[in-house]
Amino acid sequence: MSYPILFRELVRLESLIEEAMGRRLTFSDGSLGEVRFDVSGLRAGLFVARREGGEWSRVLRFNASIVSRVGEEAFRPTVAHEYAHAVVHVLSGVRPRARGMDFSSHGGLWRSLMELFGHPPRRCHDYPVTPARTVRTYRYSCQSCDREYRLGPVRHGRLKKNPGYLVCGACRGKILHLPDMNNS
């Protein structure tokens, strides 16, 4: 997968850090870590750092399906967000609060970096995403107090095999399946 706009954004961010701090912290050439497009689900991206032996392994990971859905240009803030996490990690020496600075995940330094990068310091994305799957639900009701319940397929299956598996949380009465025309 090739994302030229996102790659240029990463190089731009790296040059801003070099100008501001006099340090080269680069993923684009592989010296600081690698960039992958292997995230799935609703998460847009993440920064992962692991200590392997005496060395740090750092990876910027992004969701390719979200990139393709919203476009590279709209995804630029996420690249900045995760790269800012990487910079905080390198500068902090992995200490959340050191030398009087806030190195926490979305703390003061991270927010300052996002402003330096020209993106709002927001924690969560607002890309239009839909879950990969929807879970079917089954309606049940207590035969004593008429309280309604919605169960997922696992509990529904267990209750079919063992009718005494669940009881009403309010009155301890027996729970019965309510057949539904669309969702039984």
Image (tube, helix red, strand yellow):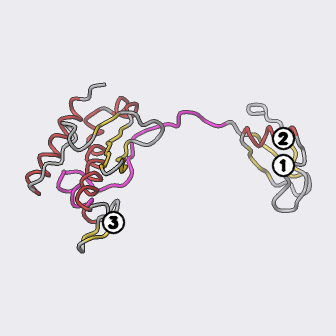
Q: Quadrant of residue 44?
A: top left
Type of the residue with mark 2: Leu
What residue does disc 2 label? 178
The residue most toward the front is 53
Which residue appears at 52% of the width and 37% of the height?
131
The local secondary structure at tag 3 comes to loop
Q: Quadrant for the C terminus, please.
A: top right
Q: Which residues are magenta?
A: 110-135
Q: Where is residue 177 drawn, in percent x and y?
A: 85, 41
Q: Position of residue 112 (x, y in %)?
A: 22, 61
- Residue 119 on the magenta span: yes
Give the label on residue 98, or none.
Answer: none
Question: In this view of the protein, which residue sits in the foreground, 79 or 180?
Answer: 79
Q: Is residue 150 left or right of residue 115?
A: right
Residue located beneath label 1 in the image:
141
Question: In the displayed structure, would residue 22 be above or below residue 42?
Answer: below
